[in-house]
Amino acid sequence: MEQRYANLTYDEALKVIIFAPGNEPLIIQMLELLLPEKKIKSLVLKDREQHGFAISDKNSTFDCYCTGDDGECFIVEMQNSPQKSFADRMLCYSTFPLREQMELKIQQRRDAAKRGETVDTMDYSLMPVYVVSFVNFTLPHESEETLEGGLLSRYELRNSHSGELMTRALNFAYLELGRLKWGKDEAKKCSTRLEQFAWSLKYMHTVDKVPENFEDEFIRKLYERSAFANMDVATQHKYESIMRTEIDIIAQKAWAREEGKAEGLAEGEAKGREEGRGEIAQNLRDMGLPLEQISKATGLSVEQIAAL
């Protein structure tokens, strides 16, 4: 089957295809699905590169950074592979728009002073920041009751005893694709909008059409935007470059694991290399590459790859 839709489980692909100018209405619907209390009239996509703290000269690049019509900030991240302290990473990301707001207030205060205006107090009020994460794995929770629809967990700053809200300035939402109950051949079992969205992010690159039971306009628009036939040439080239890079990373990791096994017995080494080629082939197949191309890349036969 020739791949019809892009693989959105890779953050760079999501950036290029979905988090692009012109897709603001789609992004709004995505955010409102994961933040159901929000009603967003409009969004402005911002420069995703924000300068880091003084201890580092490196920039932090967000997958999507935008502001709503009332000044609220939204950061969206896609993480394909499990990462240690991922929640702490998202907490760090949340500080960028918070600091940006305070820097703006300080500059306004300085400008007022230059004009000879008297400013008695510093305004520390903050517009809310929402950090939304799509993770293609599972996160640890104390209880399954934490999850909405079995997939979504949301957090804000509240009193640990009474539940009283401390501030609306900081909010987090995690959509855990790894908790999806239905596999790539079970789209018809997805009954909720949230399940259909999670399934689409995880598996759309493996199908040649929108599942018949996915009738929601937002879900169908996601497929429309992700179809190669609807992309301009520049976007297609960017996506192909991204996937070549991902293939290289997968191959390098597998090769490193194989080399680590080389210290074992010769029989074990040969078995490890065979397993390594099989793992690479399976990953490439799941990414939607034709079996013939995978065969050339791994040395395995088409029949071996199909049997994985």
Image (tube, rainbow, N blue to C red):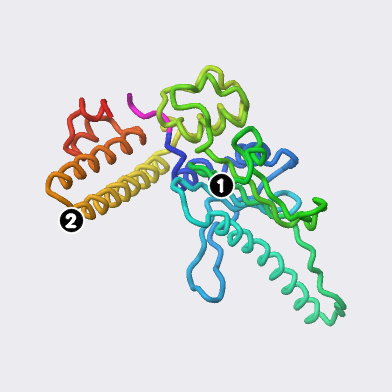
In x, y percent, where is residue 90? 58, 56
Q: Is residue 242 left or right of residue 79?
A: left
Q: Quadrant of the N terminus?
A: top left
**Which residue is painted at 61% across and 31% down in the image?**
194
Q: How many marks?
A: 2
Position above or below: 160 against 78: below
Quarter of the picture holding the C terminus: top left
Q: Residue at x 56, y 18 (%)?
A: 213
Question: Quick one: 306 or 110, which is closer to the camera?
Answer: 306
Q: Which residue type carries mark 1?
A: Pro
Side of 222 where 292 appears, left or right? left
Residue 262 visible within the image: yes
In the picture, residue 306 is in which quadrant?
A: top left
> Which amino acid is tagged 2?
Glu
Name the disc covering residue 263, or none: 2
Secondary element at tag 1:
loop
Chief secondary structure of the magenta portion: loop
Q: CA distance from mark 2 to mark 1?
A: 35 Å
Which residue is identified by label 1? 140
